[in-house]
Image (cartoon, helix red, strand yellow):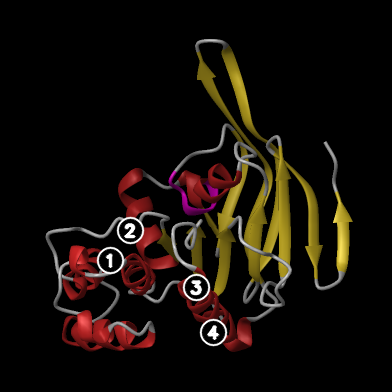
């Protein structure tokens, strides 16, 4: 993936999202234009309710926009059927949730193998080797055959990251991945993400953590469902609603 750096991987154009409530229509995202290149490490920031998680859901195809278009790796995500979308997502976008969402009755190894079994892009005879390599990469290989409940929060988050990488997706998105972790574990997760970016992955993180650190190549700020600031490598672009 190293030679693909700089190409546009994610393209959102005029994306809006509205929900119906008892009080009427609520606009959660408004006219979002966002282009992301291969190999960027992006922090999405904003106050609670600003639309950060909804924006991630647009990128992953978990939710559908009310208006506008979302293209990932030249695929119009929201034109896919639900069954095709699930397969596509498993191959092209790794998702790390704040509360891990590991399957509690499966071992850590089995959680990774299930992700690979679902997509089918990794040969069967290579899946266990890949699972062990990923668990080694995130530093929890000795816990491969334990159930999630036997691991600490930080270890479970590392397992969730390994699972998200199971099918070698070009994009990794994470929603508050360190929100419930101590500072030492948070630093370790940050280093892990930075290493993935160096390998050519595109990493997008919703975070309340310190975004002044040099790891991020770009910081996108949301307010009231709109992008109000997009800072990239010293360039500061304002787009006020």
Residue depth check, mark 1 versus mark 4: number of the one nearer the observer? 4
The residue sitting at 54% across, 42% down in the picture is 54
Closest to the observer, 205 or 118: 205
Label placed on residue 195: 4
The residue sitting at 37% across, 73% down in the picture is 158
Q: Can you tell which quarter of the image residue 81 is in?
A: top left
The residue sitting at 70% across, 73% down in the picture is 213
For the record, the magenta segment spans 58-62
Q: Distance from label 3 to label 1 (Cα)?
A: 15 Å
The residue indicated by pointer 1 is 119
33 over 152 or under it: above or below: above
Closest to the observer, 23 or 99: 99
Q: Residues within 10 Å of mark 3 (few under 14, many from 20)?
A: many
Q: Distance from label 1 to label 4 (Cα)?
A: 25 Å
- Cβ–Cβ below 8 Å for labels 2 and 4? no
* Marks 4 and 3, the one that precedes in the sequence: 3
- Cβ–Cβ below 8 Å for labels 2 and 1? yes
The residue sitting at 87% across, 57% down in the picture is 237
């Amino acid at each position: 993936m190293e030679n693909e750096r700089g190409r546009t991987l994610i393209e959102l154009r005029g994306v809006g999202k509205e929900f119906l409530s008892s009080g009427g229509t609520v606009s959660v995202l408004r006219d979002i234009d966002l282009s992301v290149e291969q190999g960027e490490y992006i922090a999405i920031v904003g106050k609670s309710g600003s639309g950060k998680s909804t924006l991630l859901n647009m990128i992953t195809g978990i939710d559908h926009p009310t208006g506008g278009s979302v293209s990932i790796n030249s695929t119009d995500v929201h034109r896919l059927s639900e069954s095709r979308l699930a397969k596509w997502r498993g191959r092209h976008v790794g998702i790390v949730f704040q509360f891990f969402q590991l399957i509690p009755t499966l071992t850590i190894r089995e959680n990774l193998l299930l992700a690979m079994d679902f997509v089918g892009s990794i040969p069967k005879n290579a899946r266990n080797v890949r699972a062990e390599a990923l668990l080694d990469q995130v530093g929890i290989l000795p816990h491969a055959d334990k159930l999630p409940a036997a691991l600490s929060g930080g270890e479970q988050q590392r397992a969730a990251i390994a699972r998200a990488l199971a099918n070698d997706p070009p994009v990794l998105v994470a929603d508050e991945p360190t929100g419930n972790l101590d500072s030492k574990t948070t630093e370790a997760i940050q280093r892990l993400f930075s290493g993935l970016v160096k390998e050519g992955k595109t990493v997008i993180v919703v975070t309340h953590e310190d975004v002044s650190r040099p790891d991020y190549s770009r910081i996108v700020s949301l307010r009231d469902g709109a992008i109000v600031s997009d800072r990239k490598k010293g360039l500061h672009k304002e787009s006020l609603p």
